Image: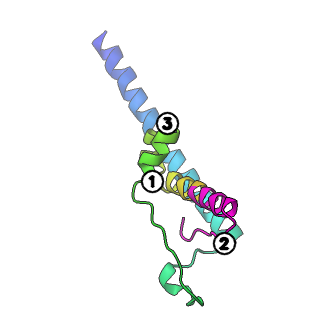
Amino acid sequence: MSVLLAALSLLIVMLAASLGWALLRLQRRVDALHRQLVGDPVPAAALPTRPGPVIEIRILNPFELAVKDTPLAGPAAKVAPRMIERIVYTRAAQQIAEQLKAQGVEAQVTTHGA
């Protein structure tokens, strides 16, 4: 009986590893396709100087925010952290744009490198 349990445990571990590997490869393909559609993200230091002041926001706890919104984001962050981070930044940018618009502020809200 213990041999059967050991074999099943090994099979489950191998299956989980192969699924994790497949998810990682898929995330890399999604990133590559995103770069083709949008173009390579420009590092903030390479951006041309803009006329006037610029506000930069860096989210220091993206995974905590993702878990607060969706409990399954915690395990997903271990496998595809860039995807979770990108989703958090996209949602934050949308929320900021909506709040500024509601207050009558005309602003361009963009994300770089997310």
- The front one of 3 and 26 is 26
Residue assigned mark 3: 72
Q: Position of residue 90 (x, y in %)?
A: 60, 58
- The front one of 14 and 101 is 101
- The front one of 83 and 64 is 64
Q: Secondary structure at mark 3?
A: loop
Label for residue 12?
A: none
Residue assigned mark 1: 62
Q: Which residues are magenta?
A: 92-114
User: Which quadrant of the structure image shows residue 5?
Assistant: top left
Q: Secondary structure at mark 2?
A: loop
Q: Secondary structure at mark 1?
A: helix
Residue type, label 3: Leu
User: Which quadrant of the structure image shows residue 91?
Assistant: bottom right
Q: Position of residue 110 (x, y in %)?
A: 62, 69
Residue type, label 2: Ala
Residue assigned mark 2: 107
Instruction: Tell me if label 3 and label 2 are in contact, CB under 8 Å.
Output: no
Q: Earlier in the sequence, mark 1 or mark 2?
A: 1
| Magenta span contains residue 18 | no
Q: Outermost residue, front direction? A: 103
> In the rendered image, is residue 47 in sight?
yes
Q: CA distance from mark 3 to mark 2?
A: 33 Å
Residue type, label 1: Pro
Instruction: Judge the density around disc 1: few (<14), some (14-19), many (≥20) Cα neighbours within 10 Å.
Output: some
